[in-house]
Image (spheres, coloured by chain):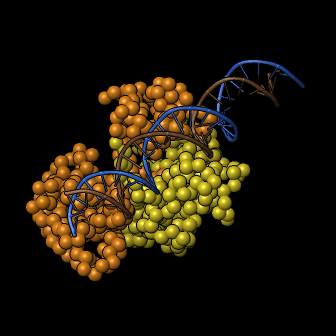
Chain colours: A yellow, B orange, C blue, D brown
Amino acid sequence: MSSIINPFNVVPKYHQLAAILKRKIDEGDWKTHTPIPSERQLEPLYNVSRATIRQAIDLLVRQGYLYREHGRGTFVSPQKLQKGIQELTSFSEDMLSRGMKPGQIILEVAEVEPTDQMRQRLEITSNTQKLTKIDRVRTGDGTPMGIQTSYLLLPQGQSLTREEVEVNGSIYSLMSEKFHLIPTEADETLEVVLATPREAELLDIAESSPLLLTERTTYSQNRRPFEFVKILYRGDRYKYFARLTRLISQ
Amino acid sequence: MSSIINPFNVVPKYHQLAAILKRKIDEGDWKTHTPIPSERQLEPLYNVSRATIRQAIDLLVRQGYLYREHGRGTFVSPQKLQKGIQELTSFSEDMLSRGMKPGQIILEVAEVEPTDQMRQRLEITSNTQKLTKIDRVRTGDGTPMGIQTSYLLLPQGQSLTREEVEVNGSIYSLMSEKFHLIPTEADETLEVVLATPREAELLDIAESSPLLLTERTTYSQNRRPFEFVKILYRGDRYKYFARLTRLISQ
DNA sequence: GACGTCATGTGGTCATTACCAGTTAGTATA
DNA sequence: TATACTAACTGGTAATGACCACATGACGTC
């Protein structure tokens, strides 16, 4: 990996610069709460204009690597804030980041009629639109961590088979390859519920144990929803992390 | 409220423009998934440069009001995504947004020694640093919703009295006025726990009922943590909302 | 010593200009 | 008719120059 910006590269200069600065932070060249070189100092260092430098820094500020103070400088954020922030992750990615091996037991793959809740969340108006339901037990290092029930809104007439889901561990990569649907944003709610007998059995816990229920609506590139997922996590095994930001503007 | 940008106003033009565009969306002048005027069309309409227009649109895109498609245009996001997104709110604000009247019962205000967990979360290195503990039952429309225990890291030697907390419903406004500490970001974890006898009594629920435990570290302007809060919510009354974004860059 | 002033450095805002890269629809061509 | 091209849009990237607002430390004054 280079520390020099290549003007002929297809990736924009400000992305290249952001990657270079990020590496300096990750590798500890710049310490927490210390200022990085000023924007005007960076200009000759990388032969780019201040506008480009500001775009690069904007990226890193939004991702939580740097923070600015008007009149003082741009500083390195505390390490602990820098990883896995505010990111939309699949169950697989989530498990991997916790250092566990993700696995799944497929219970059902089928075409179903949408309920009112699903019609509303997936913005369905047509009366003929069907959904593809995928019901799975998700495991981490072999032990059941949660029950995930996905309802997918596929392009007209399309569907998925149980085999496709089995081979491809992550539905998101499948959706991306087959239908060009890439998750970009999601609304998510969390609440506490008590395990039904069936759920308790699947998760190998006592009946009426507390569970963490998350309901997620996932949106693709053009902000259209394509997935509604319910995940029931074991309350004794799962901890949820979020990062909140106060929008200062206005 | 005006639809014209005032160049002499202290608030930046791009903020003024963002407010104008936001109003057009809120008031329904521009419909969901329809394009707004192109950046070059907006230039003469508001007498600002394209750079400024892009800054304004950037704001609204980041806040979820608009989305862009390269080569096609800038479009209005679906309504339902637009409110209360990704914002860091106090309990009071949170209750108000749910249409309930926030209240509190103060249990304790005291100076305490930090535990190891608190020292780590609040980045405390000094051995003499004390914390101010505020223990409260928070209510919505009079019924107990949660137990909130805050540990505040105040400037050397400073402290708060029970009276100050009683008068000022929101600690955040108190912190802002007295110490110029403004919450800008927070890390938050959520998990399920079971109510202890004391907690069950305070919340008026059965012993061992499931609760939603959130632990939050709040950061001020310069990214220094100043508050560590534990909140126990009644599992049967509380639903948590989050918005996730996949960071596309790189 | 305490206080105010001011030069200088920082990030914040804005205009202007140029060109690149996708998208779309009309048009010429096979 | 079907295909390929092209012009005219869209947003994306980049450089440059200017000025503003805030923070800080050096310096002079009281």
Between A22 and A47, which is closer to the camera in this rendering?
A: A47
* Residue that sits furthest to the left in the current view: B163
Instruction: Let me know if residue A105 appears in the view.
Output: no
- Where residue A200 sits, quadrant-wise, is bottom left
Instruction: Let me know if residue B180 appears in the view.
Output: yes
B228 relative to C20, above or below = below
Q: Where is residue A104 in the image (x, y as percent from the top left)?
A: 55, 65
- Where residue B71 sits, quadrant-wise, is top right
Q: Where is residue A196 in the image (x, y as percent from the top left)?
A: 37, 62
In the image, is B148 to the left or to the right of B185?
Answer: left
Q: Position of residue A96 (x, y in %)?
A: 54, 68
Number of disc labels:
0
B103 relative to A226, above or below = below
The N terminus of chain B sits in image quarter: top left
Q: Which residue is drawn at 64% across and 46% down?
A: A179
Between A171 and A38, which is closer to the camera in this rendering?
A: A38
A246 relative to A91, above or below = above
Between B147 and B39, which is closer to the camera in this rendering?
A: B39
The C terminus of chain B sits in image quarter: bottom right
In the image, is B121 to the left or to the right of A95?
Answer: left
Q: Residue at x 53, y 67 (%)?
A: A25
Q: Residue at x 51, y 28 (%)?
A: B43
Q: Where is residue A24 in the image (x, y as percent from the top left)?
A: 56, 66
In the image, is A8 to the left or to the right of A191?
Answer: right
In the image, is B54 to the left or to the right of A6?
Answer: left
Q: Residue at x 48, y 40 (%)?
A: B55
